[in-house]
Image: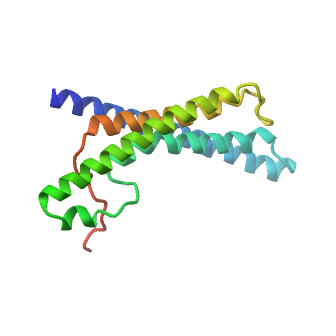
Amino acid sequence: MNTFRLSILSCLKTSTLMLASALLLTNILIILYAVILRYLVGGAPMWTDEAARFLIIGCTLIAAGAVWIEGGHMRIALLETLLPSRLSQTLIIYQWLLTLTLAVVAAVFSYRYALSVGMFKTPGLGVSRTWPMLSMPIGFGLLALQVLLYGPKRLPVMSESPE
């Protein structure tokens, strides 16, 4: 069961990072398109700024869970290393439960918010505001799922190489 959970977590991490990378690449292409149009014709369509903003938010939120698993979010792990083993494990479980709870609550509230703004349209893209806002519950939901699958164990610590 443990290897099955880890294989699902690995597949989920890889797929979310690939999706976030695709969103980032699309964002870069849209920004380049807008810059080129600004220099060639003196202006870019209004939708380019809006699409770039929504894509970077979506990219960030979708990648949040994979970054959390790798220990890439900014945090201070000093207490985990200095505390005795039993207290350290208690702190790790507390952090895990707190992260899981916040991710689930954020997913639920952002889903409700995304549905509540459905009657409004975005000015540049002209689509329902629900569509770009759905990146929030999807991102927080993916974070909650990855936190749950990872379990209450110590996160890797991102550190500089000793060189």
Q: Is residue 42 above or below residue 157?
A: above
Image side of residue 114 versus residue 139, left or right: right
In front of the other: 94 or 26: 94
Relative depth, front residue between 147 and 92: 92
Q: Where is 136 relative to 93, above or below? A: above
| Residue farthest toward the right in the current orientation of the protein | 42
Residue in the image at 84% along x and 48% along y: 43
Question: Residue 150, position in %: x, y?
Answer: 27, 39
Residue 162, image x, y percentages: 25, 73
Please give left or right for residue 104 compared with residue 42 in the image. left
Residue at left offset 55%, top offset 43%: 24
Colour scheme in use: rainbow
Q: Name which residue lies at 71% across and 26% down.
A: 118
Q: Is residue 22 left or right of residue 75?
A: right
Task: Pick whichever, 85 or 149, lies toward us.
Answer: 85
Image coordinates for residue 113, horizontal then vertical, percent: 63, 33
**Which picture quadrant has residue 54?**
top right
